[in-house]
């Protein structure tokens, strides 16, 4: 995983480049995009700069939980957020898992009432990171990512 110091080069001269797999959201229309190719331009939607989404961590959550959990079941490896509601008003919209080098990723979308879980056995023993998106509480992760220029954590 990249450390904070490795990312400083992206912020040289006030120019903020995008970073592969970062997630941005439009605060006006709700569009969410993910970076597949890094570039040095700013992402704009509805005439406004899109916001880089921070990733939250909280190992002390009580009640509904957002942290993606990795479990082995019947010899297969799964990541899930099953301790979170899946109602039409409040649910996990997607889970994404990616290798440390970001060369492989798996993304699965969910609807209300689905079980928010996906099989990640094909990653074998590679070191991976998982994030999930709650429609109300936004992005959460299982491994702490580097700090971004906003003082948040992001990919
Ligand atoms: Fe939530």
Image (tube, rainbow, N blue to C red):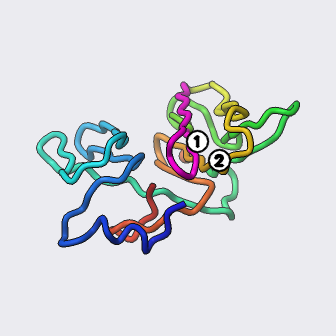
The residue to which callout 2 is attached is 68
Disc 1 secondary structure class? strand
The answer to the question of whether label 1 and label 2 lie on touching residues, with beta carbons closer than 8 A, is: yes
Q: Residue at x 36, y 53 (%)?
A: 19
The numbered dot on residue 97 is 1
Instruction: Please state which of residues 32 and 13 is positioned toward the viewer in this rendering.
Output: 13
Residue 8 position in % (x across, y down): 35, 71
Q: Residue furthest right?
A: 74
Q: Is residue 146 magenta?
A: no
Asked if residue 124 is positioned above or below residue 109 in the image, the reply reads below
Circle 1 Cα neighbour tier, 10 Å, few/some/many (<14 / 14–19 / ≥20): many
Q: Residue at x 66, y 51 (%)?
A: 127
* Quarter of image, res 120: top right
How far is mark 1 from mark 2, CA to CA? Answer: 10 Å
Split into 4 quadrants, where in the image is the C terminus? bottom left
The numbered dot on residue 8 is none
Q: Residue at x 36, y 40 (%)?
A: 36
Q: Is residue 97 magenta?
A: yes
Q: Residue at x 47, y 45 (%)?
A: 136
Q: Is residue 76 left or right of residue 150?
A: right
Residue 74 position in % (x across, y down): 88, 30
* Quarter of image, res 83: top right
Instruction: Please state which of residues 140 and 84 is positioned toward the viewer in this rendering.
Output: 140
Instruction: Please state which of residues 14 and 27 is positioned toward the viewer in this rendering.
Output: 14
Circle 2 Cα neighbour tier, 10 Å, few/some/many (<14 / 14–19 / ≥20): many
- Start-end of magenta stretch: 96-111
Split into 4 quadrants, where in the image is the N terminus? bottom right
Query: CB at mark 1 closer than 8 A to ligand 1?
Result: no
């Amino acid at each position: 995983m990249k450390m904070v110091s490795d990312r400083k080069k992206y912020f040289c001269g006030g120019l903020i480049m995008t970073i592969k797999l970062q997630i941005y959201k439009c605060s006006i229309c709700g569009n969410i995009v993910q970076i597949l190719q890094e570039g040095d331009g700013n992402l704009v939607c509805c005439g406004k700069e899109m916001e880089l989404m921070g990733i939250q961590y909280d190992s002390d959550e009580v009640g509904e939980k957002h942290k993606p959990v990795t479990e082995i079941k019947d010899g297969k490896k799964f990541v899930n957020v099953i301790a979170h509601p899946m109602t039409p008003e409040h649910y996990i919209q997607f889970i994404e898992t990616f290798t440390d080098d970001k060369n492989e990723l798996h993304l699965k979308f969910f609807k209300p009432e689905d079980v928010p879980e996906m099989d990640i056995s094909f990653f074998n023993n590679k070191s991976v990171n998982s994030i999930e998106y709650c429609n109300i509480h936004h992005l959460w992760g299982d491994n702490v990512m580097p700090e971004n220029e906003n003082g948040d954590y992001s990919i």
